[in-house]
């Protein structure tokens, strides 16, 4: 049975259910939580270092391959050496495509936003994202964006319009990623995507999805005691994770908004366009 969200994501495994979920754990991703909002990090430092090294090595090898292969094209007789020409041309195209894939991965590990946090306010039903533009799973990108490696996406979403989907990355490690499909209100038509929980082994990636769902409906299964920063250390959390990362002032205030009216007042105060 295919996904009900369209267009369907490549590597789709299954749609994730919202609401009360007994499969729940914040693991080591829960940065901070209080009665209004919770914060999860999506980039682990050890993963960041590992993938940075892999991508760096791949880029060096790719550039070296281009330097070696490119001159060979001009040395071939285009009539007599057509087979060699095709092999070298295909090799160059393959290397270029590999670099096109590796460079964004390299960027998002070189310029992380302190764990690329995602914030859920359960009283206003809003979700806030601040992430490197390359922190996603897109393959096709406008080449111009490669000139802006530290470009960020900072947005507010409605939790009601976000729906979880699990996808497979087809690696030898059978890793699974959870993605938030951003749909048009009241429909299953996807207009945007958010990486919720990057590649994890098996069912473990769904534990955080379950925790967030329980938190958003005020269920006691969402235990806040396992957060890295205790509830009474909100200032310390913001100093370490939020400050200096380009979060708009209105959005930082909106983290703690308790009603839609309060949120509207904050946006009006900062003249935020709806």
Image (cartoon, helix red, strand yellow):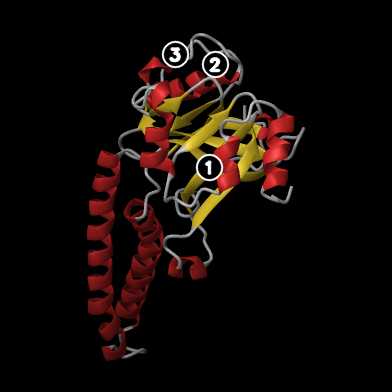
Visible residue check, residue 115: no
Q: Nearer the viewer, residue 42 or 172?
A: 42
Q: Residue furthest right?
A: 186
Q: Nearer the viewer, residue 234 or 110?
A: 234
Residue positioned 44% across, 31% down in the render: 40
Q: Identify residue for label 2.
A: 214
> Is residue 130 depicted above or below 40 in this figure?
below
- State how far apart marks 2 and 1 are (Cα): 20 Å
Residue positioned 49% across, 69% down in the render: 143
Badge 1 element: strand
Q: Pointer 3: residues within 10 angstroms few (<14), some, or many (20+)?
A: some
Visible residue check, residue 59: yes
Residue positioned 65% across, 28% down in the render: 125
Earlier along the polypeptide chain: callout 3 or callout 1? 1
Q: Identify residue for label 3.
A: 223
Horizontal side, residue 29 vs residue 164: left or right: left
Q: Which of 34 and 213 is in front in this view?
A: 34
Earlier along the polypeptide chain: callout 2 or callout 3? 2
In the image, residue 98 lies at what x, y percent?
Answer: 36, 61
Q: Identify residue for label 1.
A: 129
- Which of the 4 quarters of the picture holds residue 168? top left
Earlier along the polypeptide chain: callout 2 or callout 1? 1
> Is residue 223 depicted above or below 253 in this figure?
above
């Amino acid at each position: 049975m295919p996904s009900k969200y369209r267009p369907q994501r490549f590597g789709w495994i299954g749609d994730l259910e919202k609401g009360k979920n007994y499969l729940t754990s914040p693991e080591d991703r829960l940065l901070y939580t209080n009665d209004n909002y919770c914060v999860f990090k999506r980039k682990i430092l050890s993963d960041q270092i590992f993938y940075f090294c892999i991508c760096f090595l791949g880029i060096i090898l790719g550039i070296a391959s281009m330097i070696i292969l490119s001159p060979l094209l001009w040395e071939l007789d285009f009539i007599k050496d057509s087979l060699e020409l095709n092999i070298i041309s295909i090799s160059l195209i393959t290397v270029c495509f590999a670099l096109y894939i590796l460079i964004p991965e390299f960027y998002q590990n070189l310029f992380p936003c302190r764990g690329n946090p995602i914030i859920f306010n359960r009283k206003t039903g809003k979700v806030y994202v601040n992430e490197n533009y390359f922190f996603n799973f897109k393959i096709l990108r406008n080449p111009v964006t490669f000139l802006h490696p530290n470009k960020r996406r900072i947005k507010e979403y409605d939790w009601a319009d976000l729906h979880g989907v699990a996808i497979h990355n087809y690696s030898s490690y059978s890793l699974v990623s959870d993605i938030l499909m951003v749909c048009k209100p009241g429909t299953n038509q996807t207009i945007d995507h958010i990486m919720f929980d990057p590649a994890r082994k098996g069912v473990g990636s769904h534990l955080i999805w379950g925790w967030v769902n329980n938190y958003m409906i005020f269920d006691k299964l969402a235990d806040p005691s396992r957060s890295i920063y205790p509830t009474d250390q909100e200032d310390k959390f913001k100093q370490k994770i939020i400050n200096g990362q380009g979060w708009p002032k209105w959005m930082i205030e909106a983290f703690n908004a308790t009603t839609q009216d309060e949120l509207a007042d904050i946006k009006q105060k900062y003249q935020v366009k709806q």
